[in-house]
Amino acid sequence: MWDSDQGLSPVGCLLPQAHCFWCLPPQVLTPSPEAGHRAATSSSGRRGLLWRLRDKQSRLGLFEIGPGHELHQLTCMMQAGLWAATQVSMDHPPTGLPTEEDFSEVLTQVHEGFELGTLAGPAFARLRRSLGLAEEDYQAALGPGGPYLQFLSTSKSKASFFLSHDQRFFLKTLRRREVRALLAHLPRYVQHLQRHPHSLLARLLGVHSLRVARGKKKYFIIMQSVFYPTSRISERYDIKGCEVSRWVEPAPEGSPLVLVLKDLNFQGKTINLGPQRSWLLRQMELDTAFLRELNVLDYSLLMAFQRLHEDEQGTDSGLIFRTARSMRGVQSLEEPEAQNRRLLPDTPNALHILDGPEQRYFLGLVDLATVYGLRKRLEHLWKTLRYPGRTFSTVSPTRYARRLCQWVEAHTE
């Protein structure tokens, strides 16, 4: 699941070497153990009762990482580290125009028994602010106020997946090379979101490393959950636009287990968007063209369904419950029409929500860190021989982008 930190290098980095993460010595901040304990205790006291009352709802197959769970100690370290890391951005918010240093800063905070590294902290703090996400809320959700949740993923990767206790934020472990690719692409990723504020790309909120004692570094990212709010979601899918290894055995009827299904499970279904369809097709073209330019492939279109109540259906009545929301932050020089804006539902994480005539759809492009290098080119050759005449995920970024857009066009109306 975790990679060692040996052999890190700035290969492929888009930033000048003098500012590259892998070339800088860590800046060490050492908070006192007493201060960390007071922060965690204060947080728990203020928010514990409210969290317990709110969390009575069924979690449908999500598992609390409580005492006795094999990952409990690890996630407690993550929570304590993220609380302290967010406090730094609250005490020292980035000011002025973004700089190269915002994307290259690395901060290592030393805690009792572990170290937590925050990579590109100022850049991510700016991005969170552009989303209208208060640092206090981010800190409260990811800090020690309640246990993280784990779910059993249908992904073939060896990554671990967690949710914050309120299920709004998603944490995923990454390999070293994936982190390196994400950070190399970060300036262009931020620029793309500025040009297209309603992009379908997953909103990355932080990249961190964790080292326990003198062990190997472990890397993880934080992003907004595409599937939020979760209370009325009925079906979830992970779409890549191909067929090999794209079937998941559905859970038995009546089972509380949450499964994310795949392409072959979606056969015979349609996404009915009405007037929103043209917006979606255009935004898919913009976002996949951007990923193609980064030489990225193997990303997924996450999708979930939620049936609208009668009073939520219809364009006219829907406007009563919606407000015209747009992203804050640096505005591009493009015309507003070119930014492909739309009316956003007045709900949390609204960027990933589209309302059709009868269904609400949660949509987002995730897993943006796989580069089409030598490893993937060899995998493509092997799969071409292994699966003649069948479609599989490992193809060139150009073909991958075109195929996924074609899938969306064929399955929407």
Image (cartoon, helix red, strand yellow):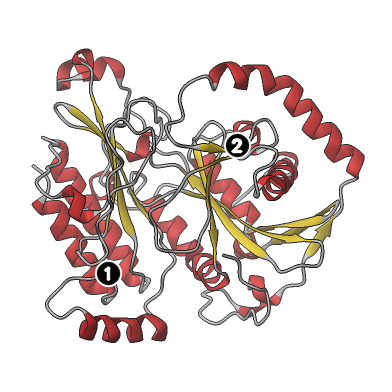
Q: Position of residue 191 (x, y in %)?
A: 43, 57
| 45 or 333, nearer to the observer | 45
Residue occupying image coordinates x 37% and y 34%: 350
Q: CA distance from mark 2 to mark 1?
A: 34 Å
Residue 257 seen in render = yes
Q: Earlier in the sequence, mark 2 or mark 1?
A: 2
- In the picture, measured across the screen, residue 117 lies left or right of residue 313, that is right
- In the picture, measured across the screen, residue 104 lies left or right of residue 374, that is right
Report the disc number at residue 31.
none
Secondary structure beneath label 1: loop
| 85 or 143, nearer to the observer | 143
- In the picture, measured across the screen, residue 400 lies left or right of residue 268, that is right
Q: Position of residue 291 (x, y in %)?
A: 34, 65
Residue occupying image coordinates x 53% and y 76%: 13
Secondary structure beneath label 2: helix
Judging by the rendered image, the residue that carries numbered circle 1 is: 393
Residue 109 seen in render = no
- In the picture, measured across the screen, residue 237 lies left or right of residue 148, that is left
The kind of residue tagged 2 is: Tyr
- Within 10 Å of disc 2 (Cα), the crowding (few <14, some 14-19, many 20+) is some
Q: Quadrant of the C terminus?
A: top left
Q: Position of residue 260 (x, y in %)?
A: 33, 46
The kind of residue tagged 1 is: Ser
